Image: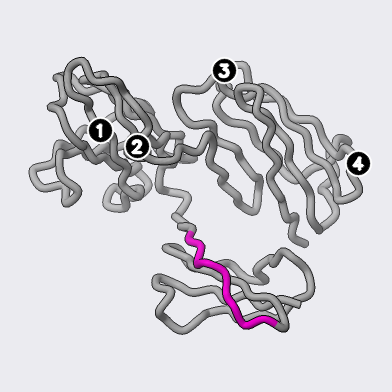
Amino acid sequence: GYTIKVYQSSPDSSPIIIIPMVDTFYLCLADLPVGSIYWKVNSSPFEVWSDISLFIIQPDSVPFLVRYNGGVVSEKRPPFKWHPVNGATGYRIMYADNSLFNNANIVPLADTIFIPLADLSQGTWYWKVSSSRNWNLYSTADSVVIAAAGAVPVASQPWKKYQIKKTDAAITVFINGGLQGIRKAAVYDIFGRLIHSLEASSKNRHMIAWNYQTADGARATPGLYFMKFSIDKEIFLEKVFVQP
């Protein structure tokens, strides 16, 4: 068997979940709090714990950024992009040449892309975005490095091709910038049977969503499913848990 421990805010705090289990996945029975969530697992009879993993739960009023993740670019005016927030009528981008956002630039926008009106200086720039649903609640900051003239841009950190947003209404795959996008996806049950075929909107090839319905429009039976999709000819598989 296994034991999973889940922590809020810090792995040094008291765990908010300690669950013994026999399976290799765990679905929380209640919503986790907004913020940083840490977790680790061990297997019986061994007492050695896995490395601690981290993910962040953010409110749905906060935009999902198309992140650079510290990557190096040669453009002096790199585009900053994010995904739309339901119900938002506008956005604010804050960007600065320091992680504390001292003397930051703040620009109001109606669109989900911002291109600086002047060249950014060489070095690391930080940025984050809020929406009209809560102007004071910004996304987790991202960073991008403006390369020196003539330098060859390279990725300074591992870059993930997509992000996942899961809500009670749907699971959405967001494709990060610089990629060809996504056109189709398929959902399978644990027996490998096709449950639903999905197709991205022709107006937005950088996201695709499954609303937990089968091909005939009925809600899928609660349980584990797999969402399969490809990006730039690379195939990905995501676990999806449909709750009762």
Q: Which residue is mark 3?
A: 203
Amino acid type of the residue that numbered disc 2 sits on in the rendered structure? Ser
Q: Alpha-carbon distance for marks 4 and 1?
A: 45 Å
Q: Which residue is mark 2?
A: 156
Say if the magenta span includes residue 47. Answer: yes
Labelled pair 2, 1 in contact (Cβ < 8 Å): yes
Q: Alpha-carbon distance for marks 1 and 3?
A: 30 Å
Q: Quadrant of the N terminus?
A: bottom right
Q: Is residue 151 shown above or below 212?
A: above
Sort mark 2 into few (<14), some (14-19) or many (20+) by Cα contacts within 10 Å.
few
Question: Which of pointers 1 and 3 indicates the residue nearer the eye?
Answer: 1
Question: Which of pointers 3 and 2 indicates the residue nearer the eye?
Answer: 2
Which residue is drawn at the image coordinates 29% and 47% (left, top)?
135
Q: Is residue 101 shown above or below 2?
A: above
Q: Alpha-carbon distance for marks 3 and 4?
A: 29 Å
Q: Which residue is mark 1?
A: 145
Observer-nearest of 157 and 98: 157
Question: Is 44 on the left or on the right of 18, as rendered?
Answer: right
Secondary structure under badge 2?
loop
Q: Alpha-carbon distance for marks 3 and 2?
A: 31 Å
Which residue is drawn at the image coordinates 62% and 24% (left, top)?
182
Q: Which residue is mark 4?
A: 193
Secondary structure under badge 1?
strand
Amino acid type of the residue that numbered disc 4 sits on in the rendered structure? Arg
The numbered dot on residue 213 is: none
Labelled pair 1, 3 in contact (Cβ < 8 Å): no
Which residue is drawn at the image coordinates 75% and 46% (left, top)?
212
Q: Point out the stretch of residues depicted in magenta.
A: 46-54
Amino acid type of the residue that numbered disc 1 sits on in the rendered structure? Val
